[in-house]
Image (spheres, helix red, strand yellow):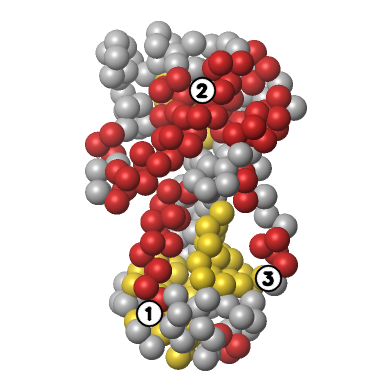
């Protein structure tokens, strides 16, 4: 599943269509699409793992789910995978194997934009308050909670926990205040590192523990487990990450 930085990158790549008019639409997304013809793309917003295309009449909410993808100016996947194809007067966008829904503008007003770790209005103090209210939550689950760290996914989770030296089965309530603040800060810091590496096509070269076999510090074999309520893969070192 694409994480927040990847969605921000999609926004950047689609920005050239803002201000342009739709000439045709297609795809098997389950909503009435005819209203899109002659609509102008007014703007693009991101919230965590979601992308919003804003038009005068309504907003299109796109979530790439586990296997979704997109392409620009060329349809690269078969018709059965095409959820939405949009032709502008300046090019085209194609979304595949994902969720595309029409929502009202009011939907955007209900989003807690301060929970997005890549947002200009990200509020770490609010994240602290939310985490403190969940003392019995495993840190690996907390990092994947989109109400607290919108945009953080499994890669960011594993790399952040290694950066701050915390094992994924640690409880939020057992983390010292300094370590809790470090967790919040690194969730944002790593997300921007992720974005910059993704832009340069070198993201995987910078992974320290995600999908790796040995700890880059001590060389010991990394532990690989599916942990927490989210049951997502965790990669961590027993020696260089502490369980609180």
Position of residue 201 in the picture relative to residue 129 (left or right): left
Q: Is residue 156 above or below residue 14?
A: above
**For marks 1 and 3 on the same chain, the one whose residue lies earlier in the sequence:** 1
User: In the drawing, does residue 22 fall left or right of residue 181?
Assistant: left
Q: Secondary structure at mark 2?
A: helix
> What residue is at 29 percent from the left and 39 percent from the top?
204
201 in relation to 46, above or below: above
Q: Which mark is residue 182?
A: 2
Task: Name the front one of labels 1 and 2.
Answer: 2
Of badges 1 and 3, the one in the foreground is 3
Q: Earlier in the sequence, mark 1 or mark 2?
A: 1
Q: Position of residue 15 (x, y in %)?
A: 40, 69
Work out how far the residue at label 1 is from the one at label 2, CA to CA, in angstroms: 42 Å
- The percent position of residue 88, horizontal first and vertical second, equals 41, 85
Give the residue at x 31% y 77%.
74
Q: Of residues 111 and 140, which is closer to you in this image? A: 111
Per the model, the C-alpha gap separating discs 1 and 3 is 24 Å
Left or right? Give the position of 202 relative to 192: left
Mark 3 highlights which residue?
105
Q: Classify residue 159 by image quadrant.
A: top left
In contact (CB < 8 Å): disc 1 and disc 3? no
Q: Residue furthest top?
A: 239
Q: Residue 83 or 139: which is nearer the viewer?
A: 139
How many residues crowd mark 2 within 10 Å: few (<14), some (14–19), many (20+)?
A: some
Q: Residue at x 36, y 39 (%)?
A: 193
Question: Disc number at residue 92?
Answer: 1
Counting from the top left corner in percent of width and height, residue 39 is at 54, 86
């Amino acid at each position: 599943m694409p994480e927040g930085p990847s969605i921000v990158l999609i926004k950047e790549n689609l920005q050239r269509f803002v201000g342009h008019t739709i000439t045709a639409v297609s795809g098997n997304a389950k909503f009435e699409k005819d209203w899109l013809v002659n609509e102008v793309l007014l703007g693009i917003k991101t919230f965590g793992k979601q992308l919003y295309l804003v038009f005068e009449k309504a907003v299109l909410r796109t979530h790439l789910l586990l296997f979704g993808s997109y392409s620009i100016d060329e349809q690269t996947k078969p018709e059965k995978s095409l959820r939405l194809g949009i032709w502008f007067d300046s090019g085209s966008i194609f979304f595949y194997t994902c969720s595309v829904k029409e929502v009202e503008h009011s939907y955007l007003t209900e989003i807690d934009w301060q929970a997005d770790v890549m947002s200009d209005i990200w509020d770490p103090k609010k994240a602290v308050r939310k985490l403190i209210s969940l003392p019995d939550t495993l840190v690996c689950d907390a990092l994947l909670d989109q109400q607290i760290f919108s945009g953080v996914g499994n890669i960011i989770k594993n790399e952040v926990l290694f950066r701050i030296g915390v094992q994924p089965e640690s409880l939020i309530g057992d983390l010292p205040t300094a370590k809790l603040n470090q967790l919040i800060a690194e969730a944002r810091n790593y997300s921007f590192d992720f974005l910059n590496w993704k832009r340069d096509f070198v993201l995987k070269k910078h992974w320290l523990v995600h999908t790796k076999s040995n700890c880059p510090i001590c060389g010991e074999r990394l532990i690989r487990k599916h942990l927490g309520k989210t049951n997502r893969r965790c990669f961590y070192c027993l020696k260089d990450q502490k369980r609180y």
